């Protein structure tokens, strides 16, 4: 692999006029600003230090990847300067009243936009890049309604399998990333499936659950986001394939693009999809919210059982100490009793966790 040099444009800090904060990326806050010497509206991500993100962005060039202009390297005012997407994040759009009129055509167009950008990162860029933090907040909307992938602060250059540190956001993270296991490009496939689910449902994934609760449900219980029963089969099958537990079974983005192109030619899909979108009030309440309540109860039950086990263990240890104090039991027997008590407690805990 060729080495990456810092060949990007260096922009002076005093050449940037900062406006308002427009969000937070990984490892930094993002501001709308003006690049004075170029008379250009830009986005600036302020950083504590420049790491790999500027190098990654400097070698990327694609319609669906945010355009990189340069970096500010004047300590302590480090920053990355990119194009400004005036439409805001996909997450913000989907949370707005404007998204209530979203159509199947728009969803398909945007699904293609993201898939094309990800295919470029994985298969066409000068270096294969695993994004690792693909989510609706890291996809932005331009003035002409084109989606662009941004925020490469968590990204890695890829060489065969990459050991993944715990970065990203739990509802969008693949099981292997949650567990910090070696991972490949298809960890981004998993995240893509979640973003597609967001566009179809206009819901927040695992809404109301804490990050670690989501991690436990996804990894230990193999739970996935609820796909409403009235969701068109082609979309449902695509999302399920993205969320398969074994990374090798998930589709690459070239296959996702092929699937989406086939869906475009399905004459029945627009009517099915638009009917599904119009009936959101019904399936959101009956299926998605019901599933979230079930998952919350499951997590609460686990917490209650864990507390009961801790209390039981505390009482067993107290009883053990009293028994030792009130008798002349040999030390070796005491140690044996302690081991048996701990083994019983751990066995009970393991049985509870696998319920």
Image (cartoon, rainbow, N blue to C red):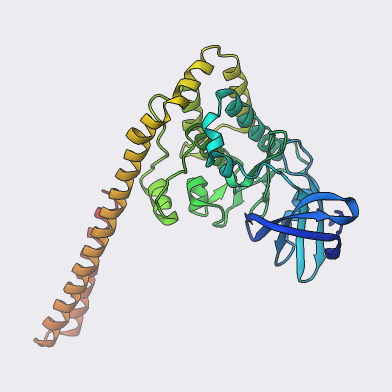
Outermost residue toward the left? 327
Q: Which is nearer the eye, 176 or 328?
A: 176
Residue 96 placed where, x, y %? 54, 41
352 left or right of 105 in image? left
346 left or right of 259 in image? left
Can residue 239 be spotted in the picture?
Answer: yes
Outermost residue toward the top? 267
**In which quarter of the view is residue 143 placed?**
top right
Residue 169 placed where, x, y %? 53, 52
Q: Residue at x 86, y 59 (%)?
A: 11
State whether residue 311 is above or below residue 176: below
Can residue 135 be spotted in the picture?
Answer: no
> How many numbered marks does the figure carry?
0
Q: Which is nearer the eye, 224 or 227?
A: 227
Q: Which is nearer the eye, 226 or 342?
A: 226
**In which quarter of the view is residue 126 placed?**
top right
**In which quarter of the view is residue 336 placed?**
bottom left
State whether residue 197 is above or below residue 9: above
Q: Which is nearer the eye, 211 or 349?
A: 211
Outermost residue toward the front? 97
State whether residue 78 is above or below residue 233: below
Q: Residue at x 60, y 18 (%)?
A: 264
120 left or right of 246 in image? right
Q: Residue at x 55, y 29 (%)?
A: 102
278 left or right of 141 in image? left
Residue 118 placed where, x, y %? 66, 37
């Amino acid at each position: 692999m060729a080495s990456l040099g810092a060949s990007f444009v260096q922009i002076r800090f005093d050449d940037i006029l900062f406006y308002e904060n427009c969000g937070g990326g990984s490892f930094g806050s993002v501001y709308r600003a003006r690049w004075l010497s170029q008379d250009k509206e830009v986005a600036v991500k302020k950083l504590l230090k420049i790491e790999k993100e500027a190098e990654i962005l400097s070698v990327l060039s694609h319609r669906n990847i945010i355009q990189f202009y340069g970096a500010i390297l004047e300590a302590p005012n480090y920053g990355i300067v990119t194009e400004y997407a005036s439409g805001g994040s996909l997450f913000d759009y989907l949370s707005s009243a404007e998204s209530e009129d979203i159509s199947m055509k728009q969803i398909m167009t945007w699904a293609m936009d993201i898939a094309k950008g990800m295919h470029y990162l994985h298969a066409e860029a000068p270096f294969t890049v695993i994004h690792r933090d693909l989510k609706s907040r890291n996809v932005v909307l331009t003035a002409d309604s084109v989606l662009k992938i941004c925020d490469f602060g968590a990204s890695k250059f890829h060489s065969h399998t990459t050991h993944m540190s715990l970065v990203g956001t739990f509802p969008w993270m693949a099981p292997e990333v949650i567990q910090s296991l070696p991972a490949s490009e298809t960890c981004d496939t998993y995240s893509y499936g979640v973003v597609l689910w967001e566009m179809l449902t206009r819901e927040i994934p695992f809404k109301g659950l804490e990050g670690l609760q989501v991690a436990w449900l996804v990894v230990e219980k193999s739970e996935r986001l609820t796909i409403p029963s009235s969701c068109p089969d082609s979309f449902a099958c695509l999302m399920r394939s993205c969320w398969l537990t074994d990374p090798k079974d998930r589709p690459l983005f070239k296959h996702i693009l092929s699937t989406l192109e086939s869906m475009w030619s399905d004459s029945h899909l627009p009517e099915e999809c638009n009917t599904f979108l119009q009936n959101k009030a019904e399936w959101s309440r009956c299926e998605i919210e019901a599933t979230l309540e079930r998952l919350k109860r499951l997590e609460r039950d686990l917490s209650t059982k864990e507390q009961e086990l801790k209390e039981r263990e505390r009482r067993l240890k107290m009883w053990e100490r009293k028994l030792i104090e009130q008798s002349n039991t040999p030390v070796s027997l005491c140690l044996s009793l302690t081991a048996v008590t701990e083994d019983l407690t751990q066995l009970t805990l393991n049985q509870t966790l696998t319920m």
